[in-house]
């Protein structure tokens, strides 16, 4: 039985075929192998989290009361999460185009994958899974300062859609939305997904708060201990112009002092957006996904 295994889940295929993006979590469909994958993933991370994770993450793991042996039910997660910051994990059938993804954050909803990777290939991750989303992202959402960063970032996505929809020339509009999207994706990547932070401002001790690292057994340690990784203080002008690749360990990471600092940088990002400074960021990543582009160009800004 394939259960709800990444890339092999009939329930997900059906939802996608019907164009259903927001779905429920059919908990009874998880197979024993799915629960076993969760158990192994969680078990091997525990020691690494204690060593390398940001203290807010460790508090978050505690507050969520996740069962280390079973795939979590989103409803249970939300019972502990919502009272803390208003955030909720919301089940999705697959990729959420970026404007919609960021707009969910603005509404304190986190699009969450419900499938889990194959128990026989724990390190192979063709796409995000529930371990990445619930064990890597959601514990951070219990922290007020971090949650506020996500919401603020969602607001910037709206400003971005508003900014590009105001550009009359069609070609210019596409060129600029590509550039702005790149800048936003890079910011998200180097903070929310792969961010490092000093234990205290000025301290030499570095911890991990980025979810891509927090859900990776190999890379969490590599990010902190490997002499090959370049680690520099977080700088917005650098980050928005920095190309990245997703298919290997990150060779370059940025260190923030606090979530308040990251929040301030999101404010600056929005100011630069309005001033047109994000309209021409440096090239790099090949071809922006069509669905992402369209999501910004056609964003409905009349809704709340
Ligand atoms: Fe992620």
Image (cartoon, grey):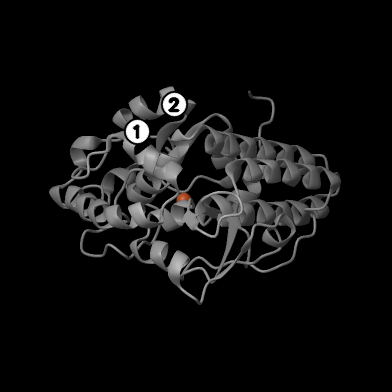
Kindly tell me whether residue 289 is visible in this rendering: no
Q: Is residue 69 above or below residue 8?
A: above
- Quadrant for the C terminus, please: top right
Q: Position of residue 161 (x, y in %)?
A: 71, 40
Callout 2 touching callout 1 (CB < 8 Å):
yes
Query: Which sits in the foreground, 40 or 227?
Result: 227
Query: Which sits in the foreground, 267 or 227?
Result: 227
Residue 240 appears in which quarter of the rendering? bottom right
Residue at x-position 48% and y-position 50%: 209
- Check disc 1 and report the residue beneath it: 63
Disc 1 secondary structure class: helix
Q: Residues within 10 Å of mark 1 (few under 14, many from 20)?
A: some
Q: Calculate the distance from the C-alpha at mark 2 to the C-alpha at mark 1.
A: 9 Å
Q: Is residue 84 above or below residue 294?
A: above
- Check disc 2 and report the residue beneath it: 84
Residue at x-position 48% and y-position 35%: 143
- Of callouts 2 and 1, the N-terminal one: 1
Q: Position of residue 291 (x, y in %)?
A: 58, 50
Question: Which residue appears farthest toward the bottom when viewing the image?
Answer: 228
Disc 2 secondary structure class: helix
Q: Which mark is residue 264?
A: none
Question: Which residue appears farthest toward the front when viewing the image?
Answer: 203
Q: Does the residue tagged 2 have its C-beta within 8 Å of any atom of ligand 1?
A: no
Q: Does the residue tagged 1 have its C-beta within 8 Å of any atom of ligand 1?
A: no
Residue at x-position 60% and y-position 50%: 201
Q: Position of residue 243 (x, y in %)?
A: 64, 67
Kindly tell me whether residue 231 is visible in this rendering: yes
């Amino acid at each position: 039985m394939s259960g709800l295994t990444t890339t092999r889940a009939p329930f997900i295929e059906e939802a996608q075929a019907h164009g259903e993006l927001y779905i429920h979590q059919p908990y009874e469909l998880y197979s024993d192998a799915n629960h076993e994958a969760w158990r192994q993933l969680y078990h091997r991370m525990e020691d690494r989290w204690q060593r390398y994770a940001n203290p807010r993450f460790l508090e978050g793991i505690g507050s969520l009361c996740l069962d280390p042996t079973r795939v979590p039910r989103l409803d249970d997660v939300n019972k502990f999460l919502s009272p803390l910051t208003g955030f909720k994990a919301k089940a999705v059938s697959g990729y959420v185009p970026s404007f919609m993804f960021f707009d969910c954050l603005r509404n304190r909803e986190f699009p969450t994958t419900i499938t889990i990777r194959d128990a026989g290939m724990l390190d192979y991750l063709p796409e995000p899974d529930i371990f990445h989303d619930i064990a890597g992202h959601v514990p951070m959402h219990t922290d007020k300062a971090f949650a506020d960063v996500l919401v603020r970032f969602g607001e910037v996505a709206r400003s971005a859609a508003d900014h590009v929809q105001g550009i009359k020339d069609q070609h210019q509009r596409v060129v600029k939305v590509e550039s702005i999207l790149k800048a936003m994706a890079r910011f998200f990547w180097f903070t929310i997904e792969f961010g490092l932070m000093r234990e205290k401002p000025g301290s030499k001790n570095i911890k991990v708060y980025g979810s891509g690292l927090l859900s990776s057994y190999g890379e969490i340690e590599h990010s902190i201990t490997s002499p090959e990784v370049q680690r520099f203080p977080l700088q917005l002008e650098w980050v928005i112009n920095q190309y990245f690749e997703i298919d290997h360990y990150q060779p370059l990471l940025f260190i923030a002092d606090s979530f308040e600092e990251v929040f301030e940088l999101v404010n600056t990002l929005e100011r630069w957006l309005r001033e047109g400074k994000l309209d021409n960021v440096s090239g790099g990543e090949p071809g922006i996904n069509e669905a992402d582009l369209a999501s910004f160009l056609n964003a409905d800004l009349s809704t709340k």
